[in-house]
Image (cartoon, helix red, strand yellow):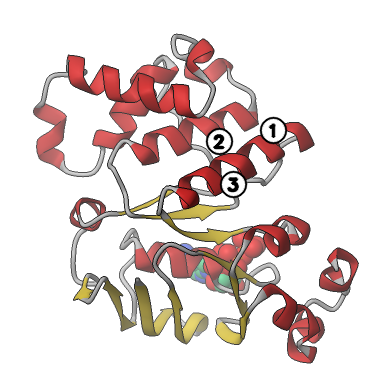
Amino acid sequence: MLEVKGLSKHFGGIRAVDNCSFSAEKGRITALIGPNGAGKTTAFNCISRTMTPTAGEVWLDGERIDHLRPHRITAKGLSRTFQISRNLADMTVLENVICQSKISGWRDLFKPAMSPSEIDKAMAILDFLGITRIAHEDGSNLSYGQKKLMDLAALLMSDPKIILLDEPAGGVNPTLLEEIVGHIRALNDKGMTVLIVEHNMELIMRLSHRVVVMAQGTVIADGTPEEVQKNPAVLEAYLGGALEDAA
Ligand SMILES: Nc1ncnc2c1ncn2[C@@H]1O[C@H](COP(=O)(O)OP(=O)(O)OP(=O)(O)O)[C@@H](O)[C@H]1O
């Protein structure tokens, strides 16, 4: 279980994340939603320690992890994707998957580029995601959606027990979106804990077991998809009524 306690990240006078507490239960899919600028990505950055929090604690399976460096957090079993796909220039998908998964600790940079066991593992992951056909494609030739799948493959190389997905469906066509949903479900069925930031409300409402809602840096609601959809504070935060439309 991932527990976030009193997490804050301030940028000068901007309280991007302000005393937030929530958890992602083991084996469940938890969504972190909220309007633009609510602080979701900043919270992800603090949890995965790509940013140093101003205050607060992050616990993973009873162990405090907020003081650890990102590669140590990955080694503890927490991995994340980024909103913008990361793609290493002039590398194939297979090379990207292996190398991206290595950019976690500087010592790894001195290991041989790709060991046979890593290639086997990466190919098995590409197979699971149904993208072995693009294994030897140049990463820069991929569609936006294929890059999202490549990122997911790189994430799985570290054998995570919890994955943080930052907008996995953003900018993806409807067919691929269903594929990505299927993969997230399949991973969750295998016991993987998922914390997901996503703007696609319809997707969030049918995929998540639990939804945490942020607005202006704070948690304003936390409950089942049905509960948060009816919550007046949530509807107020989404002034356009996007949640009602998704219901
Ligand atoms: N490095 C930074 N320096 C200053 N302000 C920042 C920085 N990163 C984020 N912010 C501000 O913090 C607030 C929260 O941003 P954040 O990106 O975490 O929100 P979000 O909920 O992920 O938004 P979106 O859904 O649009 O991606 C915003 O006001 C943003 O402008």
**Residue beneath the point at 72% across and 55% down:** 203
Q: Nearer the viewer, mark 1 or mark 3?
A: 1
Q: Bin the neighbour count of mark 1 within 10 Å (Cα to Cα): few under 14, some 14-19, many 20 and up.
A: some
Q: Disc 3 marks which amino acid?
A: Pro
Q: Disc 1 marks which amino acid?
A: Leu
Quadrant of the image for the N terminus? bottom left
Q: Nearer the viewer, residue 143 or 192?
A: 192
Indicate the secondary structure of the residue bearing disc 3: loop
Task: Say whether marks 1 and 3 touch (CB < 8 Å).
Answer: no
Quadrant of the image for the C terminus? bottom right
Q: Height in image: 123 above or below 159? A: above
Q: Nearer the viewer, residue 124 or 246?
A: 124
> Where residue 180 sits in the image (x, y, percent)?
61, 39
How many numbered callouts?
A: 3
Task: Say whether marks 2 and 1 touch (CB < 8 Å).
Answer: yes
Q: Height in image: 100 above or below 42? A: above
> Where residue 61 sits in the image (x, y, percent)?
26, 71
Q: Nearer the viewer, residue 193 or 108?
A: 193
**Residue beneath the point at 66% across and 45% down:** 169
**Residue beneath the point at 57% across and 60% down:** 197
> Where residue 140 sits in the image (x, y, percent)?
52, 19
Q: Height in image: 28 above or below 210? A: above
Q: Which mark is residue 176?
A: 1
Q: Which mark is residue 96?
A: none
Indicate the secondary structure of the residue bearing disc 1: helix
Sequence-first disc among 2 and 1: 2
Tell me the residue that label 3 is attached to.
168
Q: Bin the neighbour count of mark 2 within 10 Å (Cα to Cα): few under 14, some 14-19, many 20 and up.
A: many
Q: Disc 2 marks which amino acid?
A: Lys
Tell me the residue that label 2 is attached to.
148
Sequence-first disc among 2 and 3: 2
